[in-house]
């Protein structure tokens, strides 16, 4: 590979522990989407050694790969499959001891007789997955016991957790509280209650008199609390909209570095052009380096000249012309020592996923999980 990613295990460990400290709850480490581009099989053992007893993946096949990586390292963790399951997923759920998220009676039919633990998702406003509190939840709860499944968790997912004092979040909390009440009244005690993602931990407004709302609720229900964090593990958080209080992100460090090895260095004469459609034309003479990386690897084309840069020997090297599928040209006129074989940093010290996201008009999530070196 001429472009590749590296992860900082110490930073990942420190981020995990910082989340534990701030959240004051069990921390489920979300490693879906190749651990947001960091590599699930690479990150899972590090996170388990850091103290994670729960890992979150999106589908059963990801869960199977993570289970194999843990077995290989002689480690154990509970693995929550956070999206819905289909009939083809059942063998993997059984063989890799995965814990599926369920929310319909079809899911129960699928899993009946397996005797596995399940987590029920309650839809309180995300409008994506989840059972609605009320009659639908009552039907589901009755069927869970009848099918021999064990209700290990009840949870919901916030749609606006990065917004300060969001009324949507308050309404979702109230609906989730009602769902917990309903579950307890039905005679079931889920071992775990969970709701918060990274932003919800970062944005949690302290409530000194009552303690954290979920902790209070869990104590009343006889359950334990968990948070499900992904982005923060990798050292990033969204800005909080409408407020400046970050409880978590100041303690986080980026984990990923993405590098490429310079393939060649050449000189440009005044008037020489670079890349498709010749969008860059050299003014004075300059020195440029060719990098074996492009949008096929996840280097967003929006970083093309005059927006993006990479770091070479600690100095910014602006991207020239358009980023191609597998090749990118950068300006190293100001870095005379740069030569073929040197490393260039595409994302890491000096250029963050937030820089990429701003230039590509997206969020750091999409940048990170879009990094997939192929060349
Ligand atoms: C992806 C995901 C998370 C993690 O979200 P972050 O914002 O990355 O912390 C948590 N819960 C669910 C249901 C998710 O799909």
Image (cartoon, rainbow, N blue to C red):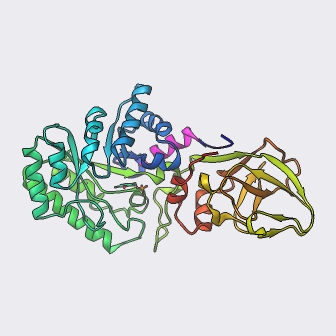
**In the picture, residue 48 is in which quadrant?**
top left
In this rendering, does residue 222 appear at all? no
Q: Is residue 176 magenta?
A: no
- Magenta: predominant secondary structure element? helix
The residue at the far front in this view is 277
Q: Position of residue 292 (x, y in %)?
A: 71, 48
202 displayed left or right of 89: right
Along the viewing direction, whichever of 87 and 105 lies nearer the viewer: 87
* Position of 253 relative to 162 (above/below): above
Identified at 36% across, 41% down, the residue is 61
166 displayed left or right of 131: right
Identified at 49% across, 63% down, the residue is 238
Along the viewing direction, whichever of 353 and 210 lies nearer the viewer: 353
- Ligand 1 resides in the quarter of the picture at bottom left
Identified at 70% across, 67% down, the residue is 307
* Position of 49 relative to 140 (above/below): above
Identified at 78% across, 52% down, the residue is 290
**In the picture, residue 280 is in which quadrant?**
bottom right
Q: Position of residue 343 (x, y in %)?
A: 74, 44
Q: Position of residue 188 (x, y in %)?
A: 11, 48
265 displayed left or right of 124: right
Q: Is residue 10 magenta?
A: yes
Q: Quadrant of the N terminus?
A: top right
* Position of 158 relative to 88 (above/below): below
Q: Quadrant of the C terminus?
A: top right
Along the viewing direction, whichever of 244 and 339 lies nearer the viewer: 339
Counting every numbered tag in the picture gives 0
Q: Which residues are magenta?
A: 7-19
């Amino acid at each position: 590979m001429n472009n590749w990613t590296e992860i900082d295990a110490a930073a990942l460990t420190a981020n995990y522990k910082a989340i534990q400290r701030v959240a004051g709850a069990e921390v489920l480490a979300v490693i879906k989407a190749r651990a947001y581009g960091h590599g699930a099989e690479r990150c899972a053992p590090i996170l388990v050694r850091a103290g994670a007893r729960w890992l979150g993946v999106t589908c059963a096949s990801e869960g199977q790969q993570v289970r194999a990586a843990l077995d290989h390292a002689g480690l154990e963790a509970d693995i929550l499959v956070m999206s819905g399951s289909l009939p083809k997923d059942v063998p993997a759920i059984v063989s890799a001891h995965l814990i599926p998220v369920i929310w319909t009676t079809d899911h129960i039919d699928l899993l009946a007789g397996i005797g596995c633990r399940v987590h029920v998702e309650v839809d309180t406003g995300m409008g994506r997955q989840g059972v609605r509190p009320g009659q639908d939840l009552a039907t589901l709860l009755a069927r869970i016991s009848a099918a021999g499944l064990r209700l290990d968790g009840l949870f919901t997912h916030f749609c606006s957790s990065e917004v300060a004092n969001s009324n949507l979040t308050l309404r979702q909390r109230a609906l989730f509280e009602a769902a917990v009440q309903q579950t307890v009244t039905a005679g079931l005690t889920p071992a775990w209650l969970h709701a918060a993602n990274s932003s919800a931990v970062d944005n949690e407004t302290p409530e000194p008199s009552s303690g954290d709302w979920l902790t209070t609720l869990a104590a009343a229900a006889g359950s334990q609390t968990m948070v499900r964090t992904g982005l923060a593990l990798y050292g990033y958080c969204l800005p909080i909209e409408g407020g400046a209080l970050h409880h978590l992100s100041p303690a986080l460090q980026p984990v990923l570095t993405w590098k490429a090895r310079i393939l060649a260095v050449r000189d440009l004469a005044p008037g020489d052009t670079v890349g498709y459609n010749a969008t860059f034309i050299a003014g004075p003479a300059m020195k440029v380096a060719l990098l074996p990386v492009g949008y096929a690897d996840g280097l967003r084309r929006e970083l093309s000249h005059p927006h993006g840069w990479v770091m070479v020997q600690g100095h910014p090297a602006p991207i020239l012309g358009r980023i191609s599928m597998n090749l990118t040209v950068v300006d190293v006129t100001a870095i005379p020592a740069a030569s073929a074989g040197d490393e260039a940093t595409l994302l890491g010290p000096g250029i963050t996923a937030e820089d990429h996201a701003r230039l590509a008009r997206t969020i750091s999530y999409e940048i990170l999980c879009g990094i997939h070196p192929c060349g």
